[in-house]
Protein backbone atom coordinates (compact mmCIF):
# COMPACT_ATOMS: atom_id res chain seq x y z
CA UNK A 1 0.00 0.00 0.00
CA UNK A 2 1.35 3.41 -0.99
CA UNK A 3 0.63 6.36 1.26
CA UNK A 4 -0.15 9.32 -0.97
CA UNK A 5 1.68 11.96 1.04
CA UNK A 6 0.20 15.43 0.70
CA UNK A 7 2.89 16.93 2.86
CA UNK A 8 5.80 15.89 0.66
CA UNK A 9 3.90 16.49 -2.60
CA UNK A 10 2.67 19.95 -1.64
CA UNK A 11 6.16 20.89 -0.40
CA UNK A 12 7.67 20.00 -3.77
CA UNK A 13 5.07 22.15 -5.52
CA UNK A 14 5.74 25.05 -3.13
CA UNK A 15 9.52 24.75 -3.59
CA UNK A 16 9.07 24.83 -7.37
CA UNK A 17 6.89 27.95 -7.21
CA UNK A 18 9.31 29.68 -4.81
CA UNK A 19 12.26 28.86 -7.08
CA UNK A 20 10.58 30.17 -10.22
CA UNK A 21 9.39 33.28 -8.38
CA UNK A 22 12.95 34.20 -7.38
CA UNK A 23 13.74 34.65 -11.06
CA UNK A 24 10.94 37.20 -11.53
CA UNK A 25 11.76 39.04 -8.31
CA UNK A 26 15.40 39.34 -9.35
CA UNK A 27 14.17 41.02 -12.55
CA UNK A 28 12.49 43.66 -10.38
CA UNK A 29 8.92 42.33 -10.60
CA UNK A 30 6.57 42.65 -7.63
CA UNK A 31 5.51 39.65 -5.55
CA UNK A 32 2.27 37.77 -6.27
CA UNK A 33 -0.47 38.94 -3.90
CA UNK A 34 -3.31 36.76 -2.58
CA UNK A 35 -6.18 38.32 -0.61
CA UNK A 36 -8.54 36.26 1.55
CA UNK A 37 -11.77 37.48 3.08
CA UNK A 38 -13.13 35.71 6.14
CA UNK A 39 -16.51 36.63 7.60
CA UNK A 40 -17.35 35.60 11.17
CA UNK A 41 -15.40 33.38 13.55
CA UNK A 42 -15.94 29.76 12.53
CA UNK A 43 -12.99 27.83 13.98
CA UNK A 44 -12.35 25.58 10.97
CA UNK A 45 -12.53 28.51 8.51
CA UNK A 46 -10.10 30.53 10.64
CA UNK A 47 -7.66 27.61 10.61
CA UNK A 48 -7.92 27.20 6.83
CA UNK A 49 -7.44 30.90 6.12
CA UNK A 50 -4.49 31.15 8.53
CA UNK A 51 -2.88 28.18 6.79
CA UNK A 52 -3.44 29.72 3.34
CA UNK A 53 -1.77 32.92 4.53
CA UNK A 54 1.16 31.17 6.21
CA UNK A 55 1.85 29.02 3.13
CA UNK A 56 1.55 32.01 0.77
CA UNK A 57 4.07 34.00 2.76
CA UNK A 58 6.41 31.02 3.12
CA UNK A 59 6.90 30.85 -0.66
CA UNK A 60 7.37 34.60 -1.06
CA UNK A 61 3.83 35.81 -1.87
CA UNK A 62 2.19 38.80 -0.24
CA UNK A 63 -0.93 37.76 1.60
CA UNK A 64 -3.63 39.93 3.13
CA UNK A 65 -6.53 38.61 5.20
CA UNK A 66 -9.62 40.73 5.89
CA UNK A 67 -11.51 39.26 8.82
CA UNK A 68 -14.95 40.86 9.16
CA UNK A 69 -17.58 40.52 11.83
CA UNK A 70 -20.46 38.20 10.89
CA UNK A 71 -22.88 41.16 11.04
CA UNK A 72 -21.45 42.93 7.96
CA UNK A 73 -23.92 43.50 5.14
CA UNK A 74 -23.84 41.82 1.76
CA UNK A 75 -23.48 45.28 0.19
CA UNK A 76 -20.36 46.00 2.25
CA UNK A 77 -18.79 42.70 1.18
CA UNK A 78 -19.66 43.23 -2.50
CA UNK A 79 -18.11 46.74 -2.33
CA UNK A 80 -14.91 45.32 -0.87
CA UNK A 81 -14.75 42.68 -3.60
CA UNK A 82 -15.22 45.37 -6.22
CA UNK A 83 -12.32 47.39 -4.79
CA UNK A 84 -10.05 44.34 -4.88
CA UNK A 85 -11.20 43.49 -8.42
CA UNK A 86 -9.93 46.92 -9.49
CA UNK A 87 -6.62 46.77 -7.63
CA UNK A 88 -3.93 45.85 -10.15
CA UNK A 89 -1.49 44.87 -7.41
CA UNK A 90 -3.69 41.93 -6.34
CA UNK A 91 -3.59 38.66 -8.31
CA UNK A 92 -6.01 36.45 -6.42
CA UNK A 93 -9.06 36.87 -4.20
CA UNK A 94 -10.84 34.20 -2.21
CA UNK A 95 -13.83 34.56 0.08
CA UNK A 96 -13.82 31.70 2.56
CA UNK A 97 -17.07 29.71 2.59
CA UNK A 98 -19.49 29.16 4.25
CA UNK A 99 -20.80 32.72 4.67
CA UNK A 100 -23.42 33.86 7.20
CA UNK A 101 -26.97 33.08 6.00
CA UNK A 102 -27.90 36.72 5.23
CA UNK A 103 -25.15 36.91 2.58
CA UNK A 104 -25.70 35.18 -0.76
CA UNK A 105 -22.77 32.87 -1.54
CA UNK A 106 -23.82 32.86 -5.14
CA UNK A 107 -23.79 36.67 -5.44
CA UNK A 108 -20.42 36.82 -3.71
CA UNK A 109 -18.71 34.16 -5.83
CA UNK A 110 -20.09 35.71 -9.02
CA UNK A 111 -18.88 39.19 -7.94
CA UNK A 112 -15.23 38.15 -7.98
CA UNK A 113 -13.54 39.02 -11.27
CA UNK A 114 -12.95 35.68 -13.07
CA UNK A 115 -9.30 36.65 -13.71
CA UNK A 116 -8.71 36.85 -9.92
CA UNK A 117 -11.00 33.96 -8.94
CA UNK A 118 -8.25 31.61 -7.77
CA UNK A 119 -10.86 29.41 -6.04
CA UNK A 120 -12.36 28.75 -9.48
CA UNK A 121 -15.95 29.15 -8.21
CA UNK A 122 -17.10 31.78 -10.74
CA UNK A 123 -19.43 30.53 -13.51
CA UNK A 124 -16.85 31.59 -16.13
CA UNK A 125 -14.19 29.36 -14.56
CA UNK A 126 -16.65 26.49 -13.99
CA UNK A 127 -17.68 26.81 -17.64
CA UNK A 128 -14.06 26.75 -18.81
CA UNK A 129 -13.40 23.69 -16.66
CA UNK A 130 -16.43 21.91 -18.13
CA UNK A 131 -15.19 22.65 -21.66
CA UNK A 132 -11.54 21.80 -20.97
CA UNK A 133 -10.39 25.39 -21.60
CA UNK A 134 -7.10 25.64 -19.73
CA UNK A 135 -7.25 29.43 -19.45
CA UNK A 136 -9.42 29.32 -16.35
CA UNK A 137 -8.87 28.33 -12.73
CA UNK A 138 -9.66 24.84 -11.44
CA UNK A 139 -11.10 24.79 -7.90
CA UNK A 140 -8.21 24.27 -5.49
CA UNK A 141 -9.17 20.88 -4.02
CA UNK A 142 -9.86 19.05 -7.31
CA UNK A 143 -6.71 20.67 -8.73
CA UNK A 144 -4.66 19.48 -5.75
CA UNK A 145 -6.04 15.95 -6.19
CA UNK A 146 -5.01 15.84 -9.85
CA UNK A 147 -1.56 17.03 -8.77
CA UNK A 148 -1.17 14.21 -6.24
CA UNK A 149 -2.30 11.62 -8.83
CA UNK A 150 0.32 13.12 -11.15
CA UNK A 151 3.06 13.12 -8.49
CA UNK A 152 2.56 9.37 -7.87
CA UNK A 153 1.95 8.69 -11.56
CA UNK A 154 -1.37 6.96 -10.84
CA UNK A 155 -2.67 5.51 -14.09
CA UNK A 156 -6.20 6.77 -14.67
CA UNK A 157 -6.86 6.31 -18.39
CA UNK A 158 -9.68 3.85 -19.06
CA UNK A 159 -10.24 3.29 -15.33
CA UNK A 160 -13.53 3.56 -13.48
CA UNK A 161 -13.50 6.55 -11.15
CA UNK A 162 -16.28 6.87 -8.58
CA UNK A 163 -16.71 10.30 -7.00
CA UNK A 164 -18.85 10.40 -3.86
CA UNK A 165 -20.31 13.88 -3.27
CA UNK A 166 -21.64 16.44 -5.76
CA UNK A 167 -20.67 19.78 -4.17
CA UNK A 168 -19.75 22.70 -6.41
CA UNK A 169 -16.43 22.96 -4.57
CA UNK A 170 -15.23 19.37 -4.90
CA UNK A 171 -17.43 16.53 -6.20
CA UNK A 172 -18.90 18.15 -9.31
CA UNK A 173 -15.67 19.69 -10.65
CA UNK A 174 -13.75 16.52 -9.69
CA UNK A 175 -16.10 14.39 -11.78
CA UNK A 176 -15.51 16.71 -14.75
CA UNK A 177 -11.72 16.59 -14.38
CA UNK A 178 -11.56 12.82 -14.09
CA UNK A 179 -13.55 12.41 -17.30
CA UNK A 180 -11.53 15.08 -19.18
CA UNK A 181 -9.31 14.13 -22.08
CA UNK A 182 -6.08 14.61 -20.14
CA UNK A 183 -3.18 12.50 -18.87
CA UNK A 184 -4.56 12.13 -15.34
CA UNK A 185 -8.18 12.05 -16.52
CA UNK A 186 -9.70 9.85 -19.23
CA UNK A 187 -11.68 7.88 -16.65
CA UNK A 188 -15.19 6.55 -16.92
CA UNK A 189 -16.84 8.45 -14.10
CA UNK A 190 -19.74 7.66 -11.78
CA UNK A 191 -20.93 10.48 -9.52
CA UNK A 192 -22.65 9.27 -6.33
CA UNK A 193 -24.40 11.49 -3.79
CA UNK A 194 -26.71 11.48 -0.78
CA UNK A 195 -29.63 10.11 -2.84
CA UNK A 196 -27.68 7.28 -4.47
CA UNK A 197 -29.32 3.93 -3.62
CA UNK A 198 -26.99 1.11 -2.50
CA UNK A 199 -23.92 3.28 -2.70
CA UNK A 200 -21.59 0.37 -1.91
CA UNK A 201 -22.58 -1.28 -5.22
CA UNK A 202 -20.81 1.66 -6.89
CA UNK A 203 -17.90 2.23 -4.51
CA UNK A 204 -16.97 -1.47 -4.79
CA UNK A 205 -16.58 -1.06 -8.56
CA UNK A 206 -14.21 1.90 -8.34
CA UNK A 207 -10.60 1.63 -9.48
CA UNK A 208 -10.21 5.17 -8.20
CA UNK A 209 -12.49 6.23 -5.36
CA UNK A 210 -12.70 9.93 -4.46
CA UNK A 211 -14.78 10.67 -1.38
CA UNK A 212 -15.98 14.20 -0.58
CA UNK A 213 -19.06 13.76 1.52
CA UNK A 214 -18.30 15.33 4.89
CA UNK A 215 -19.37 12.22 6.86
CA UNK A 216 -16.56 10.95 9.09
CA UNK A 217 -15.43 7.38 8.33
CA UNK A 218 -18.42 6.73 6.07
CA UNK A 219 -16.45 4.53 3.66
CA UNK A 220 -15.13 1.34 5.22
CA UNK A 221 -12.76 -1.28 3.81
CA UNK A 222 -15.60 -3.65 2.82
CA UNK A 223 -16.95 -0.96 0.46
CA UNK A 224 -13.67 -0.75 -1.49
CA UNK A 225 -12.45 -2.88 -4.39
CA UNK A 226 -9.12 -4.59 -3.58
CA UNK A 227 -6.29 -2.62 -5.18
CA UNK A 228 -8.26 0.61 -5.56
CA UNK A 229 -6.71 4.06 -5.20
CA UNK A 230 -8.57 5.97 -2.48
CA UNK A 231 -8.63 9.77 -2.18
CA UNK A 232 -10.17 11.05 1.04
CA UNK A 233 -11.32 14.68 0.87
CA UNK A 234 -13.22 14.71 4.17
CA UNK A 235 -11.85 16.61 7.14
CA UNK A 236 -14.36 16.66 10.00
CA UNK A 237 -13.75 17.71 13.57
CA UNK A 238 -14.83 14.87 15.85
CA UNK A 239 -14.93 15.31 19.64
CA UNK A 240 -11.92 13.70 21.30
CA UNK A 241 -11.29 14.55 24.95
CA UNK A 242 -7.81 13.00 24.75
CA UNK A 243 -6.68 15.83 22.42
CA UNK A 244 -5.59 19.23 23.69
CA UNK A 245 -7.89 20.94 21.16
CA UNK A 246 -10.81 18.71 22.25
CA UNK A 247 -11.26 17.28 18.75
CA UNK A 248 -9.61 14.93 16.26
CA UNK A 249 -9.65 15.33 12.47
CA UNK A 250 -11.38 12.47 10.65
CA UNK A 251 -11.65 11.76 6.96
CA UNK A 252 -14.69 10.37 5.12
CA UNK A 253 -12.82 7.06 4.85
CA UNK A 254 -12.16 4.65 7.73
CA UNK A 255 -8.39 4.67 7.25
CA UNK A 256 -7.46 1.46 9.04
CA UNK A 257 -9.81 -0.86 7.17
CA UNK A 258 -9.42 1.01 3.86
CA UNK A 259 -5.63 0.86 3.93
CA UNK A 260 -5.81 -2.94 4.15
CA UNK A 261 -7.55 -3.26 0.77
CA UNK A 262 -6.44 -0.25 -1.25
CA UNK A 263 -3.24 -0.01 -3.31
CA UNK A 264 -2.80 3.68 -2.44
CA UNK A 265 -4.57 6.05 -0.07
CA UNK A 266 -4.38 9.65 1.18
CA UNK A 267 -4.21 10.11 4.98
CA UNK A 268 -6.21 12.67 7.00
CA UNK A 269 -4.60 14.93 8.01
CA UNK A 270 -1.57 15.10 5.72
CA UNK A 271 -3.32 14.33 2.44
CA UNK A 272 -5.79 16.33 0.37
CA UNK A 273 -5.97 19.33 2.77
CA UNK A 274 -2.37 20.28 2.05
CA UNK A 275 -2.90 19.68 -1.67
CA UNK A 276 -5.80 22.15 -1.62
CA UNK A 277 -3.39 24.82 -0.46
CA UNK A 278 -0.92 23.82 -3.18
CA UNK A 279 -3.76 24.14 -5.74
CA UNK A 280 -4.60 27.62 -4.49
CA UNK A 281 -0.96 28.73 -4.65
CA UNK A 282 -0.60 27.32 -8.18
CA UNK A 283 -3.71 29.24 -9.25
CA UNK A 284 -2.45 32.47 -7.69
CA UNK A 285 0.91 32.05 -9.42
CA UNK A 286 -0.88 31.34 -12.70
CA UNK A 287 -2.89 34.56 -12.33
CA UNK A 288 0.30 36.51 -11.57
CA UNK A 289 2.03 35.15 -14.66
CA UNK A 290 -0.98 35.35 -16.97
CA UNK A 291 -2.18 38.84 -16.06
CA UNK A 292 0.70 40.68 -14.37
CA UNK A 293 3.92 39.35 -15.94
CA UNK A 294 2.52 39.19 -19.45
CA UNK A 295 1.16 42.71 -19.36
CA UNK A 296 3.98 44.53 -17.58
N1 LIG B 1 -14.69 26.29 2.13
C1 LIG B 1 -14.35 24.99 2.03
N2 LIG B 1 -13.43 24.80 1.07
C2 LIG B 1 -13.18 26.01 0.53
C3 LIG B 1 -12.31 26.46 -0.50
O1 LIG B 1 -11.59 25.71 -1.17
N3 LIG B 1 -12.34 27.80 -0.74
C4 LIG B 1 -13.13 28.66 -0.04
N4 LIG B 1 -13.09 29.96 -0.37
N5 LIG B 1 -13.95 28.27 0.91
C5 LIG B 1 -13.97 26.95 1.21
Image (cartoon, helix red, strand yellow):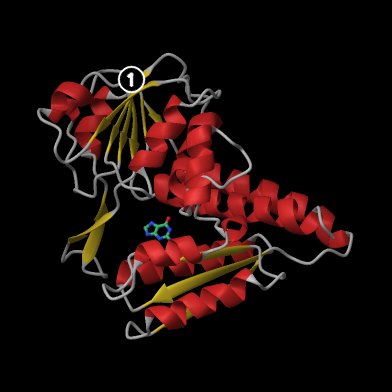
Q: Residue furthest right?
A: 27
The answer to whether 62 appears left or right of 167 in the picture is right
Q: Is residue 96 visible?
A: no
Judged left or right of residue 288, residue 271 is: left
Q: Position of residue 63 (x, y in %)?
A: 60, 70
Q: Residues within 10 Å of mark 1 (few under 14, many from 20)?
A: many
For the point 71% across and 57% down, the residue is: 288
The image quadrant of residue 220 is top left
Residue 185 % position (x, y): 48, 25
Q: Nearer the viewer, residue 274 or 35?
A: 35
Whether ligand 1 has any atom under 8 Å from the Cβ at mark 1 is answered as no
Query: In the drawing, does residue 252 fall left or right of residue 89?
Result: left
The structure residue drawn at horizontal position 53% and vertical position 37%, both measured from the top left corner, is 147
Q: As displayed, is residue 69 above or below residue 189?
A: below
Ligand 1 positioned in quadrant: bottom left
Image x and y of residue 167, in percent: 31, 47
Q: Secondary structure at mark 1?
A: loop
Instruction: State the residue in front, 144 or 270.
Output: 144
> Is 123 placed above or below 75 here?
above
Give the residue at mark 1. Answer: 207
Amino acid sequence: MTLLDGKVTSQTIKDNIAGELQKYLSEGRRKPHLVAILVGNDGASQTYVASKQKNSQAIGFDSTVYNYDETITEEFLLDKINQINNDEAIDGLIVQLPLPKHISESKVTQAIKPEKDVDGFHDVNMGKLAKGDEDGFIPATPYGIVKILEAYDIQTSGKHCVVVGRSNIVGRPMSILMSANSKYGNCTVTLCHSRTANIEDFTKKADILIVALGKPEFITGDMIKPGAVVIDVGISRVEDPSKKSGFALKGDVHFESASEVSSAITPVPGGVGLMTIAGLLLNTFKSYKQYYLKQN
